[in-house]
Image (tube, rainbow, N blue to C red):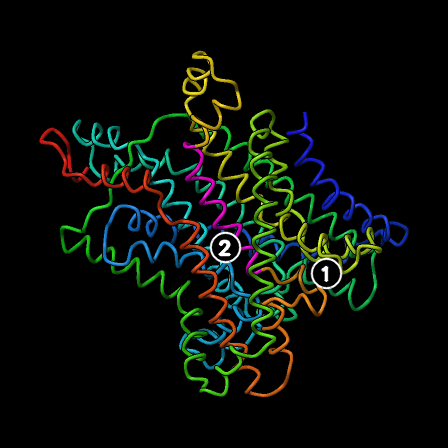
């Protein structure tokens, strides 16, 4: 009972109650024609269009790129997979500057000005293509090697074997990833604010403008309610798809191999080039500008404010990750009981960080600028990654394994710890890496709930960007480079292979026996 109440109580206190307070505040001022207003209707329609187009583009680009990264081994492959996490820790303002560098008015791509949807779509691809890629790589790793080898031995072509064997295995992973892509893009704030301009801003930007500048809580509450209805339906539908497509089974992973032909080398080269163009160019632009900033800008790294912000970022991330791990594991364990409990995992993605922050301030005025409130908000947007990863791993866990342990006298807790948890540990670490990316790069909530002495790297970068002058911009870019290195170090520590995982990888890469198909 306590296990069920923990995540539900956390969501009720940190999400449901604050949003209810925000909606109640503006209920008496609701405009009856809010959804018939052409301007606000365009905001909703455009938010849906750009989210759907981004999902389609990330799927079309991410599927072949993920297959190449999963099947081909090459120098630096592990580093590339870790670097895929970096876009998630880029503050949205800095990421927007990185997008504008290669694709803005002075960039190398033919996208001029902000009065165009392509700039926002490019920014969406920068953030979300790595998410689909990472999910695709994990999904292709779940393809049973014996099943693929059997298909090839029975005469199936590589293309037919892909559609009959690999695609069904990777489909649940991509479905859940595309759900996150839709939710991120539909409720996007930072990138839409910077790259969308007046015409192509999303609903979240409009809500922020109505609350922060006009104090129009009625229209803002109506838009927030419309947003939650749309994203809630999408989250529940994808939770149903993920649950239906998931199937328990033992996985015999296919070890990646070096490309053997010119066509395979060309495919890998094109995949890496496209990855650099869509997700690497903004990062490289920020790093290039930081390296060219000069010693005056790099002196910001030893300033007391920078050292304090770095310490706060590390401290807050560790505490929030501990809380997110407890809530995430508990929610994953109860998610299999019903569809709505599984769909509730997506609730933090359904709501806007801006709406949550304002709701928390309205509901808990005595807790304003409270560290507990700030860390709870951090954990709120981090724990779904852990819950999703573990729930998917639980779907693939053969029920016979914990049942066999209990039949031999093990208590339910001992069977979970000794049998189930080693199976779930890789998924937990994958989810923890995404959660770490969220906490390290969190910006919107920090901006509203933090105190000056709690300054993090993201808020320090925002301060530098808010000051005029080229020197402040150069210092912001240098601090962004520091943030990326800090995040990369966290990913390496989280995903560092254990001795058991190293042994499994060694067995997976052993030379094939004569009866095996090495290139199936």
- Spot occupied by residue 158 in the image (x, y as percentages of width and height): 22, 39
Give left or right: position of 86 versus 261: right
Is residue 430 one of those drawn in magenta? yes
Q: Is residue 405 above or below residue 146?
A: above
Q: Which residue is mark 2?
A: 54
Q: Nearer the viewer, mark 2 or mark 1?
A: 1
**The quadrant where residue 78 appears:** bottom left
Q: Which residues are magenta?
A: 422-441
One can see residue 440 in this view: yes
C-alpha gap between disc 2 and disc 1: 31 Å
Quadrant showing the C terminus: top left
Q: Residue at x 56, y 27 (%)?
A: 336
Q: Is residue 442 above or below residue 343?
A: below
One can see residue 39 in this view: no
Numbered disc 2: secondary structure: helix
In the foreground, 62 or 439: 439
Q: Tell me, for residue 449, which label it has, or none.
A: 1
- Spot occupied by residue 265 in the image (x, y as percentages of width and height): 19, 56
Q: Residue at x 53, y 45 (%)?
A: 385
């Amino acid at each position: 009972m306590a296990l069920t109440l923990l995540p539900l109580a956390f969501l009720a206190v940190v999400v449901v109650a604050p949003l209810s307070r925000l909606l109640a505040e503006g209920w008496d001022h609701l405009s009856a024609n809010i959804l018939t207003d052409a301007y606000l209707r365009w905001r909703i329609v455009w938010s849906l269009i750009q989210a759907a187009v981004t999902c389609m583009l990330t799927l079309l680009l991410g599927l072949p790129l993920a297959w190449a990264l999963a099947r081909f081994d090459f120098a630096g492959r592990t580093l590339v997979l870790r670097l895929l996490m970096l876009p998630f820790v880029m503050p949205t303002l800095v990421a927007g500057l990185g997008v504008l560098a290669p694709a803005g008015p002075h960039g190398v791509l033919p996208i001029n000005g902000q009065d165009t949807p392509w700039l926002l779509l490019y920014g969406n691809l920068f953030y979300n293509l790595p998410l689909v890629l990472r999910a695709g790589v994990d999904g292709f790793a779940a393809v049973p090697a014996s099943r693929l080898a059997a298909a090839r031995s029975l005469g199936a072509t590589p293309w037919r074997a892909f559609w009959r064997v690999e695609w069904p295995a990777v489909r649940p992973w991509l479905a859940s990833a595309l759900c996150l892509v839709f939710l991120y893009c539909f409720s996007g704030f930072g990138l839409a604010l910077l790259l969308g301009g007046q015409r192509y801003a999303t609903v979240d930007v409009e809500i922020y403008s109505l609350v922060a500048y006009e104090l129009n809580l009625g229209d803002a509450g109506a838009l927030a309610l419309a947003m939650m209805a749309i994203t809630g339906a999408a989250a529940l539908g994808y939770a149903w798809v993920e649950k239906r497509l998931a199937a328990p089974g033992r996985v015999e992973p296919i070890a990646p191999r070096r490309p053997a032909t010119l066509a395979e080398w060309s495919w890998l080269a094109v995949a890496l080039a496209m990855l650099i163009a869509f997700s690497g160019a903004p990062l490289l632009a920020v790093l290039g500008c930081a390296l060219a900033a000069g010693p005056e800008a790099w002196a910001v790294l030893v300033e007391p404010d920078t050292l304090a912000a770095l310490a706060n970022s590390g401290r807050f991330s560790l505490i929030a990750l501990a809380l997110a791990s407890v809530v995430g594991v508990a929610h994953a364990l109860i998610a299999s009981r019903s569809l709505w409990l599984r769909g509730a995992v997506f609730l933090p993605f359904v709501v806007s960080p801006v709406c949550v922050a304002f709701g928390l301030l309205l509901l808990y005025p005595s807790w304003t600028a409270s560290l507990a409130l700030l860390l709870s908000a951090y954990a709120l947007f981090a724990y779904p990654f852990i819950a999703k990863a573990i729930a998917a791993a639980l779907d693939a866990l053969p029920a016979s394994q914990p049942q066999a342990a209990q039949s031999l006298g093990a208590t339910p807790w001992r069977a979970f710890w000794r049998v189930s948890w080693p199976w779930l540990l890789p998924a937990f670490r994958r989810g923890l890496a995404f959660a770490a990316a969220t906490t390290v790069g969190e910006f919107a909530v920090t901006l509203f709930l933090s105190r000056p002495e709690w300054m993090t790297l993201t808020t320090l970068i925002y301060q530098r960007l808010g000051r005029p002058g080229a020197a402040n911009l150069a210092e912001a870019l240098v601090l962004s480079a520091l943030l990326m290195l800090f995040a990369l170090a966290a990913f390496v520590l989280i995903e560092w292979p254990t001795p058991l995982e190293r042994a499994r990888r060694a067995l997976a890469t052993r030379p094939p026996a004569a009866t095996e198909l090495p290139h199936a």
